Amino acid sequence: MKAIRLIAIGLLAVSFAACESRTDRTDGGGILLSVSDFDGLPIGISVNASAGGFVQIGEIQIQSVIKNPDIVGTQIMNVEIESYEVSFSRGDSGTKLPPIYVRGLFGVVPAGGTYTVENLDVMGPEQFAVPPLSDFLFQNGGFDKETSDNKMILNIHMRFFGRTLSGDAVQTAPASFTVTVTP
């Protein structure tokens, strides 16, 4: 009987631990964020023309979607954008990548609304200062030393991070586009 009681108490403790609320990491306070529109995407990057500068997107829209369509959005469901991250992958045979680009960003996406960012930087001087992009500088040969090619296909992936006014973490799924990099 004592063993059954101990097992029951143990199962009860496990069930309470399993029910511990951790939805703030995945729930987003009933809000989803989405990159809903791009305008002015670069299709090509000349390293020698861009080195020391920035590559930008003309305009990007971040949309807030209320998960439950039966709920009316409130101000505590507004999302304060905190930062964004740009990562890279190769669309060719190369494996070397520019470093990840992370920046703070301030703005509010109203619950069920959109936030527009103009002239958003997706690459800066630190991406051009190291291989593989620095290989395309004329003084470094003007070609990708890994693939021996004079162009590179680079996939650019962006994610935005924020918090609802009630404190729940929210982020977009990666939004991606591809550019051709040349000297």
Image (cartoon, grey):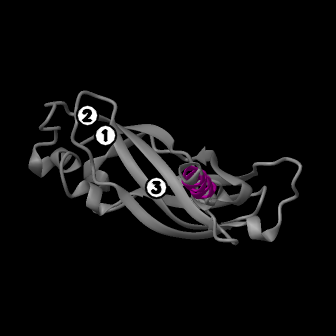
In three-dimensional space, the C-alpha distance between marks 2 and 3, rounded to whole angstroms, equals: 20 Å
Q: Mark 2 or mark 3, which has the lower sequence index?
A: 3
**Residue highlighted by disc 1:** 181
Q: Please say if 164 is above or below 137.
A: below
Q: Please say if 110 is above or below 172.
A: below
Near-viewer residue (106 or 161): 161
Residue 150: x and y in percent read: 20, 33
- Rendered residue at 19%/54% (across/down): 130
Indicate the quadrant where residue 146 lies: top left
**Residue highlighted by disc 2:** 151
Asked if the residue at tag 1 contacts the one at tag 2, i.e. Cβ–Cβ closer than 8 Å, the answer is yes
Q: Amino acid at mark 2?
A: Lys
Predominant secondary structure, magenta span: helix
Q: Amino acid at mark 3?
A: Gln
Residue 141: x and y in percent read: 10, 43
Q: Label 1 neighbourhood size at 10 Å, few (<14), some (14-19), many (20+)?
A: some
